[in-house]
Amino acid sequence: MSWGTELWDQFDNLEKHTQWGIDILEKYIKFVKERTEIELSYAKQLRNLSKKYQPKKNSKEEEEYKYTSCKAFISTLNEMNDYAGQHEVISENMASQIIVDLARYVQELKQERKSNFHDGRKAQQHIETCWKQLESSKRRFERDCKEADRAQQYFEKMDADINVTKADVEKARQQAQIRHQMAEDSKADYSSILQKFNHEQHDYYHTHIPNIFQKIQEMEERRIVRMGESMKTYAEVDRQVIPIIGKCLDGIVKAAESIDQKNDSQLVIEAYKSGFEPPGDIEFEDYTQPMKRTVSDNSLSNSRGEGKPDLKFGGKSKGKLWPFIKKNKSPKQQKEPLSHRFNEFMTSKPKIHCFRSLKRGGATPEDFSNLPPEQRRKKLQQKVDELNKEIQKEMDQRDAITKMKDVYLKNPQMGDPASLDHKLAEVSQNIEKLRLETQKFEAWLAEVEGRLPARSEQARRQSGLYDSQNPPTVNNCAQDRESPDGSYTEEQTQESEVKVLATDFDDEFDDEEPLPAIGTCKALYTFEGQNEGTISVVEGETLYVIEEDKGDGWTRIRRNEDEEGYVPTSYVEVCLDKNAKGAKTYI
């Protein structure tokens, strides 16, 4: 089966067919190209989908993803991201192994087809030229034969006519011979050209055209084979990523199997546990007691004498309220059902936190005392961890600067070692500040965890809330007055009424006499007192010392009558007046 023998006369149809084959190949290339674009678009959409549902960094949503179910969801999003990557691999492999390869092959195929059909047209033109030569030779031979025949007839006519001279007859005879010779020459030429044409035609239809058509046939068969191989590659590209896609799906299944509902329940407890004990039983309040009183009981002396038993029975205090807290004495509220009062008790918001909370700034104190104990402990621990990380970062920076300074000392041409002193001092100051902050929060953490009975004096100084004149009962009011939801009750118990007099609160607002100066100090570095209870100083400034460092790293100083506070002991050079003994006061 050969196109050269079977389709020897179908040159034009073969030309159309081979062009159709190239068009089909280009159409397949376009199909694969659109498939790669779909894969890329799908992968992009999957990645955007995965990114859309990823928790945002440093947000509340990120904290919620500590549960195993949420972690499994995150794993699913990550696996989907990898899944999208495999579709990108499909697109890349199809583009490199099919589209690029076939596009190059199509260009080669077009060149080969053009060359083959060019040779075929050249052979056609040659055989057509030979045919034209044959036709021209044949017509000339025919014409010469007719001319020779007419010349012969004219000679015979002249020879038979007696009136014609002998010279005219001889002339007609010579003309007939010439025409006859020309006819013979045309005959010989026509015969030669005919033989040549037959030879060329035989070569054309049995050699040239079969060879050309055979090349075209092989070219077309190679195109068909190449298209089949590309289709196999198309399938193999998909098959190669199936194991990896399977691993992605296995990862999703594994993440789903890692969900632990018990662990999530425990995390809920850790997140919202307050550490308070459930409220006890509500005591019965007997409102029939005034009905049993006698007329004499209404006297002033008897009412005073029986006021205390009534308070004791009711378990409430009619004494002085906490400052800034108003008691609602509306009779309607006393008649509310117990269920309403219990609901109000369970849903009440934290109220003002005594004097110390007011000094710290109200609703968001630095020591997180507005939170329940367990949540406060977690916040403090988190703050301590953050400060430790910052300290480590500053220490690493200090070590790097120290090493650089050593290099400058050994090789002065690389830099001036003195230029790093300011930076080194600044980093050391930052480390000192961070360590003091850490000690402050560790003290609060120890208080919450029960290692200390109450907030230490050092912690109070570092938070800027230290007041040596405050009575212990007022300092501990944040602990004695705290309710299960972190708020403070409005009334005191009968026992606290006896212990705390009305003058205790008035003393909070009395102006204290300035402490005597026991020496002077000179600021070695600039310190910005940002916390309550601290004071800002400028390098080289001279101030009065009114309280020595008691081992906590802080010294109490005074600038004038209105400005005093604590500064780090390492920031000042202290010169104590030994003869003062408390007698030297600030003027």
Image (cartoon, rainbow, N blue to C red):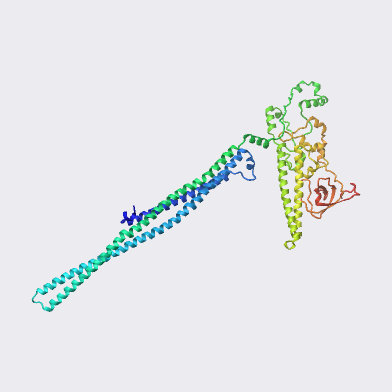
In the foreground, 497 or 94: 94
Above or below: residue 301 compared with residue 504: above
Q: Position of residue 314 (x, y in %)?
A: 76, 26
Tell me: residue 327, above or below residue 75. above
Tell which of 324 and 499 is nearer to you: 499
Q: Relative to residue 182, is residue 319 drawn left or right?
A: right
Kindly tell me whether residue 524 is visible in this rendering.
Answer: yes
**Hey, which quadrant is residue 365 in on the image?**
top right
Horizontal arrangement in the rendering, residue 345 relative to residue 37 (left or right): right
Q: Position of residue 85 (x, y in %)?
A: 54, 47
Residue 364 visible? The answer is: no
In the rendered image, residue 391, in percent from the top left (x then y), is placed at 73, 48
* Residue at the farthest right position: 579
* Count of numbered circles on the image: 0
- Furthest toward the left, the residue is 162
In the picture, measured across the screen, residue 178 lies left or right of residue 316, that is left
Q: Position of 384 compared to 573: left or right?
A: left
- The residue located at (25%, 67%) in the rendering is 192
Residue 22 coordinates in the image, percent (x, y)? 40, 54
Nearer-the-camera pick, 125 or 288: 125
